[in-house]
Image: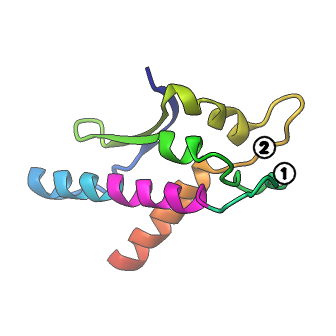
Amino acid sequence: MPILVEKVDVSDLVTGTQKQRARRLSRIKRELTAEYRRVLGVPGRGTPSKPGQPPRRQTGNLRSGVRITTNQKTKEASVRLLNGANYGAFLDAGTGTIAPRPWVQRGIKALREKLAKKNG
């Protein structure tokens, strides 16, 4: 079962009729998925990322294990990780021995900036 990493309120981005809200949520899901694929797609070639930078792609497990779901009723987007990629939550937050390699909030911030430019 996928684990929940982050739940994001996107109600400020989802307005209008029910049909418009559904289209906007679908767009948010597509764009957020694309952003995480971009952020997590930087090849590592055996070299890990530096603390404070998003994790570099070593095997591709994390990149392919990210799932975005949206909920029209609550106007939320959820970032989930499949079982084989659950280490992504530890990379994002850090542990006692690993410094954080944040990637979840970076994707959300990039999405908000991109949509603000298109709507503004």
Q: Earlier in the sequence, mark 2 or mark 1?
A: 1
Say whether residue 64 is left or right of residue 12: right
Residue 68 in which image quadrant:
top left
Indicate the position of residue 91 as horizontal and vertical percent values: 72, 39
Judging from the image, the colouring scheme is: rainbow
Q: Residue at x 11, y 50 (%)?
A: 18
- Majority secondary structure in the magenta region: helix
Q: Which label number is shown at residue 100?
A: 2
Indicate the position of residue 38 as horizontal and vertical percent values: 53, 63
Mark 2 nearby-residue class (10 Å; few <14, some 14–19, many ≥20): many
Q: Which residue is mark 1?
A: 51
Residue contact at pointers 2 and 1, CB within 8 angstroms: yes
Amino acid type at image mark 2: Pro
Say whether residue 71 is left or right of residue 38: left
Indicate whether residue 5 is drawn in magenta. Answer: no
Q: Residue at x 42, y 78 (%)?
A: 117
Q: Residue at x 84, y 51 (%)?
A: 51
Q: Which stretch did the figure color magenta?
A: 29-41
* Image vertical order of residue 118 relative to residue 2, above or below: below
